[in-house]
Amino acid sequence: MQRDHRNQRDHGKLDEGREHGMSVAIYPGSFDPITYGHLDIIARAARVFDRLVVAVLENPRKTPLLGDDDRADVIRRAIEETLAPDVARRVSIERFDGLTVEAARHHGAGFIVRGLRAVSDFESELQMAHFNRKLAPGIDTVFFMTALEYAYLSSSLVKEIARFGGDVRGMVPAAVAERLEAAAAAG
C-alpha cells in the first residue's frame, strides 16, 4: 500500500501518534459517570492500541455530578474492577481542558477513540471528527460501535436515575454506583 506523501509537511508526520514505536490513542469524554458502555469501548480500544489515555474533560461551564478528582478516581477503580490486568495496564487516566486535539498532541496520541451507540450518534461524531482532522491533520478518529447490550446506556440517563434514587448497578460498576448514591444523597 502506497502512502500519499504530498503536503506531508502540512499534514503532520506519517508516524505521528507513535511513541517510541507504540501506537497511542486518546479516549476523551466527561465520563460523568463512566458506564459499562464506556468501559466496553476502553477494553476494546486498549486491545487495538499499545497505550490508551482516557482523557477526562474538565469543563468549567458544566457542573458534573461527580467532581473532577472523583471522576478520575472512579474511572480508575472501574477499570481495575472490570478489565483484565494485562489490558488495564495499558490504560492511563488523565484530566484535561481545552481542545481534544491538543490533549492528543500532549500525550503523543495519533488517534482519537470515539464510541457510537446508534446511527443518531454518528452525525455529530462525524462532524467533530472532521473538525479535529482540520485542526490536526495527523490525528485520526477511530470509531468503535458499543456492544449491543450497552447501546441503551447514556451517562445523562444514568445520572438522572441515580438522582431519583433508582438502581444503576446494572449500568455501571459497583464503585461507580456507590459514588453516585453518595453524591445523590448529598444532594
Image (cartoon, grey):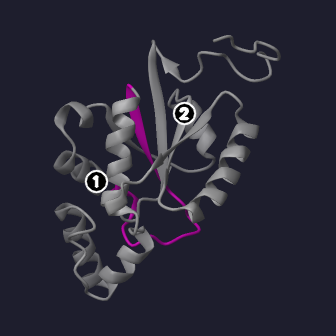
Depth order, front residue of 179/27: 27
Decide which of tag 1 and tag 2 comes sooner along the chain.
1
Q: Is residue 49 above or below residue 98?
A: above
User: Is residue 74 toward the left or the right of residue 8 in the image?
Assistant: left
User: Is residue 16 toward the left or the right of residue 81 in the image?
Assistant: right
Q: Which mark is residue 73?
A: 1
**Image quarter (top left, top right, bottom left or bottom right) of the C terminus:** bottom left
Q: Residue at x 19, y 45 (%)?
A: 80
User: Is residue 6 toward the left or the right of residue 156 in the image?
Assistant: right
Q: Which mark is residue 111?
A: 2
The quarter holding residue 139 reads: top right
**Image quarter (top left, top right, bottom left or bottom right) of the N terminus:** top right
Depth order, front residue of 89/4: 4
Specify whether residue 67 is painted magenta: yes
User: Residue 77 location in percent, x, y?
Assistant: 22, 51
Magenta residue span: 50-72
Q: Of helix, strand and loop, which one carries label 1?
A: helix
Q: Which mark is residue 185?
A: none
Residue 70 shows in the view:
no
Q: Classify mark 2: residues with Cα within 10 Å, few (<14), some (14-19) or many (20+).
A: many
Q: Is residue 44 above or below residue 115?
A: above
User: Residue 36 location in percent, x, y?
Assistant: 30, 59
